[in-house]
Amino acid sequence: MKRSKSQAVYKFLPRTWISERDDNGVAVTAQITHWSYKEMKGIYEDFIENEIKRQIKLFGDRGGDISSFDIRDGVHSFVVVEPNCIDEVPDILGKISPLVFYCSSCGKVIEKKKASDVDRGTWWCTNPNCKKHSVKQLQMIYACECGYAQPVKIPYVKGVHDFIYRPNQFNERFKMFYKVGNSEKAIDIAQICPTCGKRLLPDNANSGRNYKAFTLCIINLVDHRSGEFYKKGIEAQKAIVAMWFGKMTQNEYEQILDNVELAFSDQFRSDAKRQEAENQVRGLITLGLINETDFETAVAGIMAKSNSGNISIERFAAACDDICRQFVNQNPVAYKEWLNHYSFKLMQYNTVKYARRVISLQDSIDRQIEMEFIETPQDILGWHSKLGIKNMQVSCDIQIVNCTYGYSRIVADPKNNKNTNWPQLKLNAYDKNKEGTANLVYGAKLDTEGILFEIDQAKIIQWLLDNNIIRQEQVIDLDDELAVKKWFAEHVHGDLISMFGEIEGDEAITKNVFGLLHSMSHAFIQAAGEISGLSSNSLTEIIFVETASIFIYSQTSQGVPLGALSGMAEMRYEYFLRRVFEDTRNCIFDPVCTERDDTACHACLIIPEISCNHFNAGLGRKYMYSIEGVQGPKIGFWEM
């Protein structure tokens, strides 16, 4: 049975149970054992590996068990692989599991010794008084927060081989029965976890509770120059941050990308240039062309002249240090960690922002005026002002790498672990590669298009002030773009946001900014799905809190050739904005939904988990609308 690579990364992963129909139409549950894989090429593993390690560390910081992983700096711990895709050779392999079967008519239970023993005769009851084609697989497993999982088995009773199972009787679904003389006895099919000692009841093998995959969606650096640049380390990271703060132009960045090795060479370092300038000046003094007293002035003049057109990375790295001087002086170690995360997000943002092919906001406005869908640009710009959208563009030819690096069982967040026998929820690693040097990360590439929404950072700061989340003395000049960006960098800590969407500690600013952006993202996804014709689980999101940006994109191949999102943004963008505002304001479950503190439910903001990278956490219509009775915020961002 064929499945797309994206489906494989989300569903057909090693050590999970899946249910499919065989060639005879019988529903069969199997456990995925392994992939036939190859190492993924055309990606920058260091770029991906750093983020995987950061997410694993955040899981550990929340009280989880991460002992299966090696997340030390400088250690190559992960390798991203994908299906081999060789004709006539299966890429994903599994085995039938569980091996317990029962007759739905008479209840007789049988158990096969191995998966290869299951054949067509398995589905016929062997009870001589029944013999019906009514045998079903008992599709149940045991799973535990400590990582243990096993298929259900027939309980052991000395001397007993014949058991009856009655699944339709609710009070008996965790029991089997056997005869003792003329009477019938029940035996519990619960199991004691051999790892932690917890009593485990069998559960549906296909239940999402039993396998929580941890997947990252990362924008690939399709321009190999960007990848080579980022590999240069901390100076490259500083230069990316300097560009965000306006200390490097896009043209200067392009020039550096065209000359990466030269930009990082010693040739343009200030020490080398100083030495060269001094030698030139001493030569001029020897010739009597300038005085000894003018030595420093002449050296400075030569260096200033040589700096024009200088592509040395040094000055851009120094510009970043100057902007972040207080941070650098206070905690150099924390500054380095912040740079690593901040530049990682900016590199992805830049890849989307400066995509090879873009449909701009102006293109959208011009097209809709031409088609007479709107009368003036203000029809759209007015909505932008109301919704706090500073800019919109469609970014085409974007490549997303979906990476699944581990899984947990029963719950995904260590904070929600209720197993007192094993207080640390285990994050389980996948097998090592063939060399035994790194854990496998199961990946798939997706070439897609998406819409980038850049939200007004100054308006967000004003919204925080209006809701008393920040004080007046914390507010800077909101007309100063550089000051606004620096304020966001200082107060909004994206590095503290885990895949669970929850922020630890006293981080009211970060929590509210992320809650706002995440809620807006889901409102955009809901409306875009309705208008573009794509289902809600065909769209997903990447949120850049650092730049207050939201990127929604199609995660299925069907939406790209059809131009579903780009067509909507180009032809029906004004209608989309109106639907976003009007459709999210009310929920069909109001007033029940508005009485919840989070003001979010499956009827308004919660979307399928496959479409949300943060497990639908931190959502609320209260961030966008003014809803009476909530603890806060009181003033909605869209109603300021």
Image (cartoon, rainbow, N blue to C red):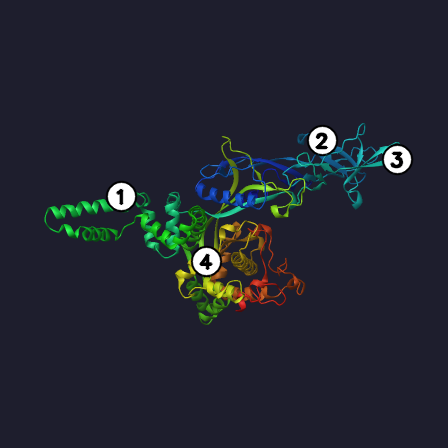
**Vertical side of 193 occupied by 549: above or below:** below
The residue pinned by badge 3 equals 183
The residue pinned by badge 4 equals 488
The residue pinned by badge 1 equals 267
Q: Earlier in the sequence, mark 4 or mark 2?
A: 2
- Marks 2 and 1 sit apart, C-alpha to C-alpha, by 72 Å
Residue sitting at x 54%, y 43%: 404
Q: Secondary structure at mark 2?
A: loop
The residue pinned by badge 2 equals 112
Residue sitting at x 63%, y 48%: 416
- Marks 1 and 4 sit apart, C-alpha to C-alpha, by 35 Å
Q: Earlier in the sequence, mark 2 or mark 3?
A: 2
Camera-side residue of 199 and 543: 199
Mark in front: 2 vs 3: 3
Residue sitting at x 28%, y 45%: 269
- Marks 1 and 3 sit apart, C-alpha to C-alpha, by 93 Å
Count the marks: 4
Q: Are marks 3 and 4 in contact (CB under 8 Å)?
A: no
Q: Earlier in the sequence, mark 1 or mark 3?
A: 3
